[in-house]
Each structure stands twice: as structure tokens, then as C-alpha cells.
Amino acid sequence: MGADLPDIDLHRSIAARLAEHGQHYTANRRAVVDALARAGAPITLPDLLAVDESLAQSSAYRSLSVLIDVGVVRRLVHVGDHALFELAEHLTEHHHHLICESCGTVVDVTLPDRVEAAMDRTFDEVATALGFAPLHHAVDIYGTCATCTP
Amino acid sequence: MGADLPDIDLHRSIAARLAEHGQHYTANRRAVVDALARAGAPITLPDLLAVDESLAQSSAYRSLSVLIDVGVVRRLVHVGDHALFELAEHLTEHHHHLICESCGTVVDVTLPDRVEAAMDRTFDEVATALGFAPLHHAVDIYGTCATCTP
DNA sequence: GTTGGCATGAGAGTGATTCTCACTCTAGCA
DNA sequence: TGCTAGAGTGAGAATCACTCTCATGCCAAC
């Protein structure tokens, strides 16, 4: 995914979201979004800078933090010393992560609706029983990817 | 949990695990394990040092890294600037995490066996389809805890 | 063209974590 | 008991991902 997305809609939707929060969709923020969309999977900040060499580190971090604040980007902190960044789910689709314990690669994966619904019901029950108001969930499946399996 | 555990077994099991890897179960490592067991939930390093004030920061970090290497301790990096540490599942029981997005509190939660089995089956299918050999999974349920809900 | 306000980016600063190194402890041996 | 080798310890220095600062750039509205 990523390259095949209706990019116009993507950018329009993000611009609207930023506007709601009194923020502008500047060239720098757009470049960050473009890089994330082009990657099509969670990537680190060094990777992001490699995808678009015109980005400055400090500005990339700042743009990401603005985009995270308005809910356009999600920050993952599973593994390794760098955080991973990806576009938020409302811009892509609800998905989870397959993480290679050997090389750290992260791949998106979607589960059948039936399973998601069942999980949601269960999570609601157990969370409520413990006094939590559940909002969303994340599933990480750890294993070994194809290239790391001998 | 924690205080009610059969501590003797816990320590014997950890000593054995360390021995397998050519490591000793030293007083410092035991103190770290004790602090984690006493906490009964994932805690940060500063919390660990607060639980047992005789621990030195650098030694605590090193002991944790040894314990993580041999699979006795697990490191979580959900939220905030400090990592969270907890005893590995084979010493406690298979569980997941309920995370308060407001205050960062993390609480253990177990799911019904039926649900775990169903998830395992699904995860196996989708992971295998993408060339992954799945080993284990983690579910994080994000929401608001009782004290943060108005 | 000027003014005000936000965005940018280079570099300094911050802080969690890791590394270094001198010291201590322990096991094994005679 | 004394000796030695090796591993463990802890105080402080070093590292490095990330954030903050501040001088400059850009743009919209008069």
C-alpha cells in the first residue's frame, strides 16, 4: 500500500484534521506524510530522513510530534532504540503488527472482522471489570520473518 | 500476585535458567528479581530502585540486562520515557496489559483460555500467510483507568 | 512595504541507558 | 590459611535518541 493510495484524499483529510486543531499543512509536514505513505510500513526517523533527504532532523521530529498530536501519525515503541512511525489507522485501516525478533522488521497485518469483533467484546469485558474504560487495542505478533528463518 | 508466589520455586527456577547460560544467581540479581516479584506489575527502573534502595543504578540495569538475556525478565516500552520491567511469563502466567493513556499505569490482565486459543489460531494463520514463523503475541488494551476517568 | 505570527533548521541541551575501570568477592587449589 | 583467576559490583563518564532554543525565513493581511 502507500503508492496506490488516493493521495489527494489523504492530504485533504490530513489538512482538514490539522485545521481543526488550528494547525497548517505546511510543506515540511506534507513531506513527512509523503515519506510515511511511501514507506507503507512503520519506519524509524533515520529511515524517514533517508527517504526524503531534504528533511532536517529537528523539523522532522517536530512535524511528527504535531502530526501525532492531531492524530494523523502513530508512534510505536516496540523494539530497538529508535521509535517507529506510521500513518494513523483512520488514514489506512485497522491493522496489527508482525514483528521479526531477529531483524526487527515490522509488517502490517489485518485480522478477519469476526476475530476483531470477538476480541473487542472480550477486551471490553475484562477492562471494564478492572475499572478501565477501553478505547482501542494493539496486537503484536512476534516471530521470525521469512528472510531470517533458515 | 508476587507475595503469594512460591518464592523458593521462583528463585530455584531462575537459578537454573541462569546456570544454563553459564551465569550465576548473585545477590544483586536476586534482589532485582525480588523487587520485581514484590511489585507484581511492570515497573520502571526508578521504581525498582525505590523498592530496594540498596540497589545501584548501573548494577540494576546490568542485572536486568542479564536477566532479560536469559529470558527471566521482559522489558516493555509502551509509553513514557522509562522502560518497564516485569518477570517473564513462564514465571508468572500468560497475560496482557491494560494501559492508561492518561497516567501511564500498566496493569496485568488475563484472557479466557477460549479467547487465547482462538487468537493463537488466527495469528498462526495470518503470520504464516506472510512468511512469518509466529512465536508469541502481546495484546495491549489502551484506555483510561478508574482514577483518571472523571 | 511593513508588520505579526508561525514554521524552519542548525546546533545545544537533556536524560535514560550503557560503558569503563578500579575495586571486591568467590571458587578452586595447594 | 594464603594465593590466584575470573566474574560481579558500583560510581561516574560516555552515548545517543530525542527535545529545546533562537535566529532566520516565509506568508497573509493590512
Image (cartoon, coloured by chain):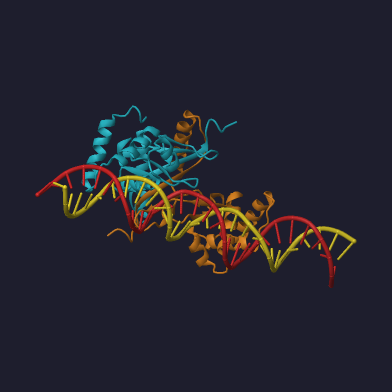
Chain colours: A cyan, B orange, C yellow, D red
Residue B15: image x %, image y %?
65, 55
Q: Residue furthest top?
A: A4
Residue B131: image x %, image y %?
50, 29
Residue D22 vs residue B106, the one in the foreground: D22
Name the quadrant containing residue A109. top left
Name the quadrant containing residue B37. bottom right
Quadrant position of the C terminus of chain B in the picture: bottom left
Q: Is residue B79 left or right of residue B48?
A: left
Q: At x 25% / y 32%, what residue is drawn?
A: A9
Q: Is residue A67 left or right of residue A21?
A: right
Q: Is residue B96 above or below residue B25?
A: above
Q: At x 35% / y 46%, what residue is drawn?
A: A59
Number of labels in the image equals: 0
Residue B96 vs residue B78, the one in the foreground: B78
Asked if residue A2 shows in the view, the reply is yes
Residue B21: image x %, image y %?
67, 49
Asked if residue A67 shows in the view, the reply is no
Q: Is residue B57 above or below residue A33?
A: below
Q: Is residue B73 left or right of residue A31?
A: right
Residue C6 vs residue A114, the one in the foreground: C6
Residue A55: image x %, image y %?
37, 41
Name the quadrant containing residue A131. bottom left
Q: Is residue B109 above or below residue A8?
A: below
